[in-house]
Image (cartoon, helix red, strand yellow):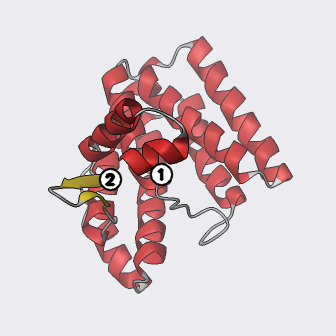
């Protein structure tokens, strides 16, 4: 901890606090007399994270679709338009920033900020490890089109279609992340996705 603090040019206290936060998220583990170990994300971890996202985001979008305010819908359209500009500019970092906000607006629109914050932390568990499907197993345009299906269902006030589009989007993301992260045959990841029959 001391060497890391020196390297960053800060005191030990903020380093310790940051490591405690990372440990709470399951990203590192304190080991007695050995320091801190960075934990790798296993296939099981990824399956758990995406299973939770399906369990939370699918019912949330159903509820959100029924109670979207004009202001929230305008904010969602704004994020969608920003994603389109990022696709054209081939700017993955900017696209992912607006991707995150797109999902946050939907979750916040169901009236549960704790849910939105929890799902955001689940997304962090993936993104902080540098795991992304963009430019690897699908294009930014592919992700953008999945978001289009979600937005159109919300605009039509069709909660079942919105839930179906969100479910397909999250499962597709999970399937691709699991496949590319662990070098699995895609059929193994697909089997995980097919086992999630609940909405």
- Name the disc covering residue 142, or none: none
104 or 45, nearer to the observer: 45
Q: How many marks?
A: 2
Left or right? Give the position of 115 relative to 6: left
120 or 84, nearer to the observer: 120
Residue at 46% over, 27% down: 65
Disc 2 designates what residue?
A: 27
Relative to 44, residue 105 above or below: above
Q: Secondary structure at mark 1?
A: loop
Q: Quadrant of residue 117?
A: top left
Q: CA distance from mark 2 to mark 1?
A: 9 Å
Left or right? Give the position of 52 relative to 102: left
Q: Secondary structure at mark 2?
A: loop
Left or right? Give the position of 88 relative to 43: right
Say few, some or many: other residues with alpha carbon within 10 Å of mark 1 (under 14 / 14 to 19 / 20 or more).
Answer: few
CB atoms of marks 2 and 1 within 8 Å: yes
Q: Residue furthest bottom?
A: 185
| Residue 135 x/y as whole percent | 67, 66
25 or 45, nearer to the observer: 25
Say few, some or many: other residues with alpha carbon within 10 Å of mark 2 (under 14 / 14 to 19 / 20 or more).
Answer: some
Relative to 37, residue 59 above or below: above
Relative to 77, residue 184 above or below: below
Disc 1 designates what residue?
A: 128
62 or 2, nearer to the observer: 2
Visible in this render: residue 185? Answer: yes
| Residue 174 x/y as whole percent | 42, 62
């Amino acid at each position: 901890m001391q060497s890391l603090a020196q390297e960053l040019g800060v005191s030990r206290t903020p380093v310790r606090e940051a490591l405690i936060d990372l440990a709470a998220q399951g990203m590192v583990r304190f080991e007695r007399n050995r320091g801190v170990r960075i934990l790798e994300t296993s296939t099981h971890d990824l399956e758990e994270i995406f299973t939770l996202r399906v369990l939370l985001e699918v019912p949330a979008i159903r509820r959100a679709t029924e109670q979207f305010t004009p202001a929230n819908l305008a904010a969602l359209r704004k994020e969608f338009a920003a994603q389109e500009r990022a696709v054209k500019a081939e700017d993955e970092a900017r696209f992912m920033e607006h991707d995150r906000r797109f999902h946050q607006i939907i979750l916040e629109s169901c009236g549960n900020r704790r849910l939105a914050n929890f799902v955001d932390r689940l997304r962090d568990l993936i993104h902080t490890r540098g795991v992304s499907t963009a430019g690897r197993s699908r294009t930014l345009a592919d992700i953008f089109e999945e978001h289009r299906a979600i937005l159109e269902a919300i605009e039509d006030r069709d909660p079942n279609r919105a839930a179906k589009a969100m479910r397909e989007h999250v499962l597709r993301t999970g399937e691709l992340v699991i496949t590319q992260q662990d070098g699995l045959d895609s059929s193994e990841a697909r089997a995980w996705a097919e086992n999630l029959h609940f909405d």
